[in-house]
Every structure is written in C-alpha cells, then in structure tokens.
Amino acid sequence: MSFTIGLFPAAANASDKRIDGFNYLNLVTDDVFWFVQISDIHIGRSIDAENNLKWIVHNLPRFVKPEFIVETGDLTDSLFEFVRNAEWITYSQIVNSDADFLAEYHDIPGNHDRYGDPNWNGYIAYSWSGFVQHQTKPNDPVGEFVWTVH
C-alpha cells in the first residue's frame, strides 16, 4: 500500500528580484501559501487506503492549512468492473464527509479510474470535480481529455 502526499510552499508574490535577475522566495508569511498534492490513494485496494483518505480529509487541513488540495489520480483501484461502483461510492462518501475539506479539494482521475470505463462514468458520477471533456482526433483512437476543476 502506498500513496504520495506532497506539501509545497509557493510564493504569492514572487516579484522580489535578486541582483542576478532571478526571483527568490520572500519568507514573509504573507507571501507564502501551501498546497497539498496527493496521488495514488487506490480506494478498494485495502482498508488502509480508506483509512488514509479519511485521515487526509479530517486531519490534514488542520495541520497544514493549505490553500488547496489536489488528488492527481488513481482515486480508486478499479481493476475489476464488478467492484468499481463500490469503490467509487466509498471514495465519494469519504471525500464528502467534511464540507470544509471540499472547499479546498480538487480531484483528477488516473489510469486506474478508467479501467473498463472508457467514458469516465465513475469519475463523473462520484468524484468531487467530476467533469471530463473528450475530443477525438483524426488517426488517434484515444483522443484528448480535458479535466476542469471548480
């Protein structure tokens, strides 16, 4: 069982320039904000995945106080069609259990979220962000996908 959490400080105003012309991070706290990037939760792989996501939803924002949180794929494990809906429902129930968390949360699907689901129906129905735009291109059977988060 593994997943990744990245904590990143970012400069809200990186206009301060060094003598050599490069920007630098001014460590005045008003100029820094935090965001969290999470990857590979894989709900459905094990009970640990569910417990990890519950901890993220209910505890992480209190410790880090990020401006936003983004989950960048493999929200579910979804290797088999017969368990896919149960995984999506579990994911949705956990993520939707804290309204304050949702105010700063965005999710983008990964390859596991599409196995056996070429139209992203699970992601569209159960994820928080839930919008996919698909365009096919000539000579490209897969096409191009665009995710818009709100």
Image: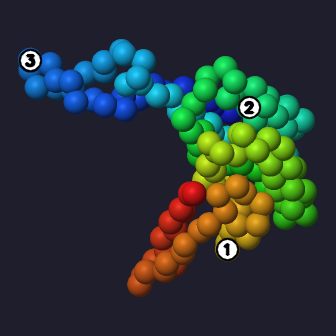
The residue type indicated by label 1 comes to: Asn
> Can you identify the residue that label 2 sits on?
56
Residue 35 position in % (x across, y down): 53, 33
> Can you identify the residue that label 3 sits on?
19
Of the image marks 3 and 2, the number of the one nearer the N terminus: 3
Q: Nearer the viewer, residue 96 or 141?
A: 96
The residue type indicated by label 2 comes to: Ile
Tag 3, which secondary structure? Answer: loop
Q: Is residue 70 left or right of residue 62?
A: left
Of the image marks 2 and 1, the number of the one nearer the N terminus: 2
In front: mark 2 or mark 1? 2
94 in relation to 83, above or below: above
Give me the residue at 42% from left, 18% from top.
29
Residue 112 position in % (x across, y down): 70, 54
Furthest-front residue in this view: 30
Residue contact at pointers 1 and 3, CB within 8 angstroms: no
Structural distance between the alpha carbons of marks 3 and 2: 41 Å
Tag 2, which secondary structure? Answer: helix
Image quadrant in which the C terminus is located: bottom right
44 in relation to 7, above or below: below
How many neighbours does mark 1 have within 10 angstroms: few (below 14), some (14-19), or many (20 or more)?
few
How many neighbours does mark 3 have within 10 angstroms: few (below 14), some (14-19), or many (20 or more)?
few
The residue type indicated by label 3 comes to: Ile
Image quadrant in which the N terminus is located: top right
Q: Which mark is residue 119?
A: 1
Residue contact at pointers 2 and 1, CB within 8 angstroms: no
Structural distance between the alpha carbons of marks 2 and 1: 28 Å
Q: Nearer the viewer, residue 57 or 2?
A: 57
Confirm whether residue 125 shows in the render: yes
Give me the residue at 50% from left, 66% from top.
146
Structural distance between the alpha carbons of marks 1 and 3: 52 Å
